[in-house]
Amino acid sequence: MTVPPLKKQRTQPETANARIYEATASAPVNIAVIKYWGKRSEALMLPTNSSLSLTLDQDQLQSKTTVRVVVDADGKENDAALWLNGNREKLSGRVTALLARMRALRVTKEAKDASIPRLASKPLLIASVNNFPTAAGLASSASGLACLAFAVNAALQLELPPADISALARLGSGSACRSLFGGFVAWDMGSKPDGSDSVARQVASETHWPNMCALILVASATQKEMPSTAGMQTTVETSPLLQHRIQAVVPDRMAAIEKAIAARDFDSFAEITMRDSNQFHAVCLDTFPPIFYLNHVSHRVISLITMYNQVKSKSNGRKYTVAYTFDAGPNAVLYLLKEDVAEVLRLVNSYFPNGVDAASSSAVDEYYGLSKQFLKAESKAVEQAEQALEAEVSKGVKKFEESGGLKRIIYTTIGDGPRILGAGNAGEGISLFTEAGVPK
Ligand SMILES: Nc1ncnc2c1ncn2[C@@H]1O[C@H](COP(=O)(O)OP(=O)(O)OP(=O)(O)O)[C@@H](O)[C@H]1O
Ligand SMILES: C[C@@](O)(CCOP(=O)(O)OP(=O)(O)O)CC(=O)O
């Protein structure tokens, strides 16, 4: 790495407006309801099927990234350094390719306009933090790579529209292309060999379905054994079920779920979501050798939600009250409507003893986060109704024996796309670097 010695960095602005050389951005996580799993081109990062996700509120889960252009040093073409959660990381081939593409766009811009600063060949310092577990099946690569592309666009002053940044983010991680938009987002697989029609688009904004929200039941926050990239490649090579999914299942599901979202039809949305999660994990099992992302806690969550939906439908007349979906890990993401969160949370609590209620208030805060607001005492009538419901549910599903099956619960709503938090002078305010270029 030939990033220049940090102490030589200029502390005075090179121009009257030094803001141009650094940008800090935040970007949201997205959790798919129609899963992307498989590439038809690894070089161009093109998927074997379309997918659709919900963007989660970045005030809860986010990646935050500062990109600094070191203006007073000349670097080699690909000179860059990355710190992730405070640790220096080797740049992956994909991130290197992404940065090279973005620098090439700056080269073109500079060639057309002699008056703009020469930034294209300057080294880049990048610091990023995730406020949730990294590489644990909670879509950190999606928010992380979307945030990187968004911040580089600002730091290099490329002024690209979100759709173009999305296509660049895709080069870093496929699912990242969906995190460039808020609300409900489709990634159309496209059919052109050059990938120009494989693009993400907003299906509905974050305000479209205001009471839609998510409860994430964290069953494990440790790094998964089989990364998505390697896992899906083996699936493409070995699973006959994947071919059926690609050809006969996903196209209809994409159309149906877009319709369900447009009509705010939760029953259809929920059934498609659960079926697609099930099929994604079936495809993992059909991979040879098989890939297991769900564990015994995940299975128990599926049984609990299935039973709850059945019992609840007798009183509320809806086929489904909660939809579960699982990414490449054991953590459940439950999509549900706000008015149902309190009851579902108490049910989850009674099935998964957590041992924290009696403990210190900081342990309670850590376990429940924002979902704590739903735990307030209810009237006697509500309590009795919930007890009756729990008794019914317990006929079909056993309680989890040990405490600690779930590590944490995250409550969040649907949110907007990436934001620029600041483009200030080196080291100031929101920046993840000190003035001397050391990650804070
Ligand atoms: N903030 C970030 N900035 C840059 N790269 C990041 C960031 N966060 C995560 N990554 C990259 O993404 C990798 C994790 O991706 P991976 O697909 O294995 O897990 P995940 O995204 O958490 O889970 P999944 O995509 O299956 O839901 C990290 O090892 C790192 O290389
Ligand atoms: C299960 C998933 O979360 C898989 C995400 O895979 P990644 O986007 O992490 O994979 P790469 O493109 O190889 O970086 C489903 C989804 O988000 O659609």
Image (cartoon, helix red, strand yellow):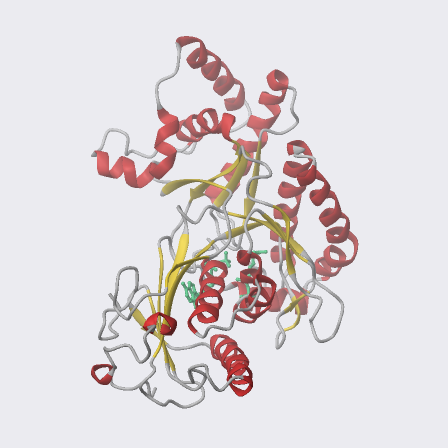
Near-viewer residue (388 or 74): 74
Compared to residue 287, the image places residue 13 above or below, namely: below
Near-viewer residue (188 or 150): 150
Residue 5 appears left or right of 299: left
For the image shown, how many numbered marks are present on the structure?
0
Dividing the picture into quadrants, the one containing residue 12 is: bottom left
Near-viewer residue (306 or 380): 380
The answer to whether residue 406 shows anywhere in this view is no
Quadrant, the N terminus = bottom left
Q: Position of residue 358 (x, y in %)?
A: 24, 29
Near-viewer residue (152 or 393): 152
The answer to whether residue 382 shows anywhere in this view is yes
Residue 378 appears left or right of 142: left
Going 43% across and 67% down the picture, which residue do you hit?
151
Residue 256 appears left or right of 220: right
Given the current orientation, which residue lies at the most extreme top position? 381
Compared to residue 408, the image places residue 8 above or below, namely: below
Q: Position of residue 129 (x, y in %)?
A: 35, 61
Q: Quadrant of ligand 1?
A: bottom left
Q: Position of residue 189 (x, y in %)?
A: 70, 62
Going 59% across and 45% down the picture, which residue do you hit?
205
Q: Position of residue 328 (x, y in %)?
A: 52, 55
Compared to residue 206, the image places residue 141 above or below, namely: below
Quadrant, the C terminus = bottom left
Dividing the picture into quadrants, the one containing residue 86 is: bottom left
Going 34% across and 72% down the picture, which residue do you hit?
17
Dividing the picture into quadrants, the one containing residue 168 is: bottom right
